[in-house]
Amino acid sequence: MVRIDNNRLLKDQEGKNNQYKALPMLFAMLLSGFIGLFNETALNVALTPLMELLEVGASTIQWLTTSYLLTLGILVPISGLLLQWLTTRTLFTSSLLFSIVGTFIGAIAPNFEVLIIARVLQAVGTGLLLPLMVNTILIIFPVEKRGSAMGLIGLVLMFAPSVGPSIAGLILANLSWHWIFWTSIPFYIISIICGLLFLPNISKLTKPKIDILSILLSTLGFGGIVYGFSSAGGHGETSSGWSSPVVITTLIIGGVSLLLFSIRQLRMKQPVMDLRAFKFPMFSLGLITVLLSTLMTMSTLLILPMFLQQGLAVTALTAGLVILPGSLLNGLLSPVTGRLFDKFGPKWLIRIGFVIVAIVLFIYTTINTTTSLTTFILLHAIMMVAIAMIMMPAQTNGLNQLPPDFYPHGTAIMNTLQQVSAAIGTAVSVSILSVGEHSFLSGVTNPESLENQVAGFTAGVQFTFIFALVLSIIGLIISFFIKRVKVTGNQNPRGPMH
């Protein structure tokens, strides 16, 4: 059980000491975060019936997912700026209002165009909330208890997206798709009431100069990268492919814009995203570790269900149930690994986690159509437990090294690059799968036969897991350089601690 002291003595934005209730504050944010991330994946199981009901094609309906991810990719990078301009209560209330309005519009949406607007508004609400949630925990909890609190965020981040499709499937079996939205609204209302009653203004407002050019470059950069990789990494009818002019153009625009954005931030006295955070070694190593974990997780969560359906010929529901136990375990164990981090630090948790992940991925490289579903359930469960040992300890340890002035920037950097790495992981995994499949089929005499098609797809899947295995080995090597951050009373905002 996670034990967190309820009463916390904090300074408000006027510098006065006040007693605040930590648990209701945390409850309000975690509940709203859970529903926001639930909505991110809940609609996925309804995409196929929505194509017929809304009279749109596969490439069009995919925008219900793409628009959500694209909005997050554009909004999250500037969240550090918003955290320094808007009070805690204002930002929290705004995020909930966007979520409530978007969810209500989705519940009454009569057509596809209105539903797209609803998804964008929902994504704005989630995009505002997630960085605020991490930033608030960094402020209200002392260093020795941040692991436990961040573990609760880990529970939300994994548990909500995991149960989203399952709960939505249950709703669709008994009610219309509109009820996926209707069921979320009461929880949002509870969250906003709880937040208004207990959430204080605790973040420090510095109100830096708003640089329009930086925001424009950030939007083009991160938006272009996320859209380009998401389009290239699609599969089936929704795939644009790497040769698509749209994909090539957006990736070039995104890459150039990000380069110009980075140069500009390093030259500004008050940057939108302070890249000097990378001067702190444990933050940089923690970030790399988190990104590697995200890449491995996204690769597995995409490729494994595809293999189960196309290689083992199971239904989509069965494939979802196979990976559900592991995802749930990951979420439920995040608070446990948070407490272990508070007690023992990150070093051995992360090292052991990467060793376990590497072993599981090595076994994945040998799977074939005779591998049992029980084996897949056990392997995925073990891997996701190991990921829980890596993600939150690495993130918490990295953020702990930052001075308080860098909290908004550190959370913005981590959240943004996680969105980008998720898009990259999806695209690269699908591409490696295709290369492996094509390589196998080009070496057989009858590539059109069903047997060779299945064998080719299996070979492509094995190639993808080899890629993930290499990432896990890189992560294991990096873990030997990660040390527990010792936070003192005065942290130097100009550079790394010694």
Image (cartoon, rainbow, N blue to C red):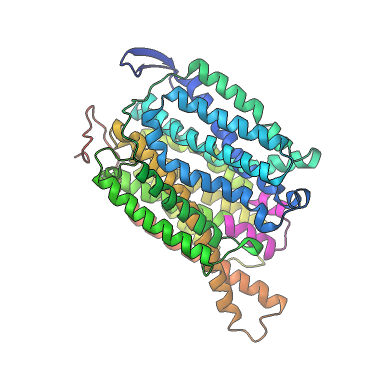
Horizontal and vertical percent position of residue 248: 48, 65
Q: Is residue 302 above or below residue 192?
A: below
Outermost residue, left side:
498
Please, what is the dominant secondary structure of the magenta stretch? helix
Task: Name above or below for residue 33 compared with residue 192.
Answer: below
User: In the picture provided, is 316 more to the left or to the right than 75?
Assistant: right
Examine the rendering and report whether any part of residue 420 can be seen: yes
Which quarter of the picture shows residue 391?
top left
Which quadrant holds the C terminus? top left
Q: Nearer the viewer, residue 369 or 105?
A: 105
Which span is picked out in magenta? 302-323
Front residue of this view, candidates 46 and 264: 264
Q: Residue at x 36, y 27 (%)?
A: 139
Question: Is 321 included in the stretch rendered in magenta?
Answer: yes
The residue at 41%/43% (across/down) is 77
Residue 12 vs residue 357, the one in the foreground: 12
Q: Residue furthest right?
A: 174
413 magenta-colored = no
Which x, y percent locates residue 288? 37, 51
Q: Closest to the observer: 90 or 443?
A: 90
Q: Residue 231: x and y, percent?
A: 55, 59
Which image quadrant is residue 185 in?
Answer: top right
- Residue at image point 30% right, 31% down: 404
